Amino acid sequence: MKEKINYLDIFRAAWKGLKSQFWLLTGLLIGFIIIYSLLFIFAIPAKGVSFGISSIIICILSSFLLCLFQLGYLKNCFQTLDGEEPQFSSYGQMSRKLISYIAASLLFMVITSIGFVLLVIPGIYLLLRLQFFFASMVDENTGIIGSLKRSWEITKGQSIRLFVVMLIMILISFAGQIALFVGIFVAVPLIILMYGVAFRRLTTPMA
């Protein structure tokens, strides 16, 4: 029986997707970084507003902006994997999931943090088993609890292989950072596409 998680297959599919929409996926990433950076650069406290209040407002706005970009960008990556052109409208569509995504992310962080506090290995295990809640929310329209349950279901018996995939992603990220930092604009979309491919492989019934 063919394994759902095949490292070379995941990399090849992600690389093929990246090549097909390289400039658009990279441009979206660069555009977000610029907007995100400007938010902090021009975050000068308004007249009559204390620095503390201003900082809290900027922190909240930046967090919402980051989460919205993550949702829309993953949707763009799934569109790429489906052979479609990524749509800017995805960010508007995904905005409806913003609160649910934030809530699920907080729950995910609490659960995995408990695992890391107890021992490192349980934390890694929980992270591997629950990581696809994000993909499930975007690609399958699941809710807060449903997305976590879905991730737990599809990753059963796949922890070791998913751990290897995670190590490969870390190596790609590291390579992107040492390549004069420019390589990060290749590494990031490639890693997210690999994440999307892995999710699709796990949710595809075996023949």
Image (spheres, rainbow, N blue to C red):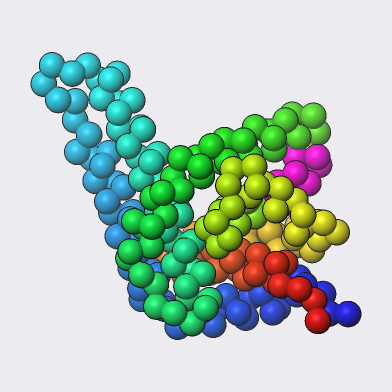
Q: Is residue 131 left or right of residue 119?
A: left
Residue at (35, 40) in percent of width and height = 62
Residue 172 visible in the picture: no
Q: Is residue 33 a member of the stretch shown in magenta?
A: no
Q: Is residue 5 left or right of residue 49?
A: right
Residue 25's image quarter? bottom left
Q: In the image, residue 188 lies at what x, y percent?
A: 49, 62
Which residue is situated farthest in the right direction here?
1
Residue at (64, 42) in percent of width and height = 145
Residue nearest the viewer, comparing 67 with 170: 67
Q: In the image, residue 155 lies at what x, y percent?
A: 77, 57
Residue 15 visible in the picture: yes
Residue nearest the viewer, comparing 113 with 150: 150
Relative height, residue 161 to residue 115 (above, below) = below
The secondary structure that dominates the magenta segment is: helix
Residue at (58, 60) in percent of width and height = 140
Q: Where are the magenta residues, as a range?
A: 121-130
Relative height, residue 167 to residue 68 (above, below) = below
Residue 114's image quarter? top right
Residue at (39, 78) in percent of width and height = 85
Q: In the image, residue 121 lies at what x, y percent?
A: 81, 42
Residue nearest the viewer, comparing 135 with 9: 135
Relative height, residue 11 to residue 143 (above, below) = below
Residue 3's image quarter? bottom right
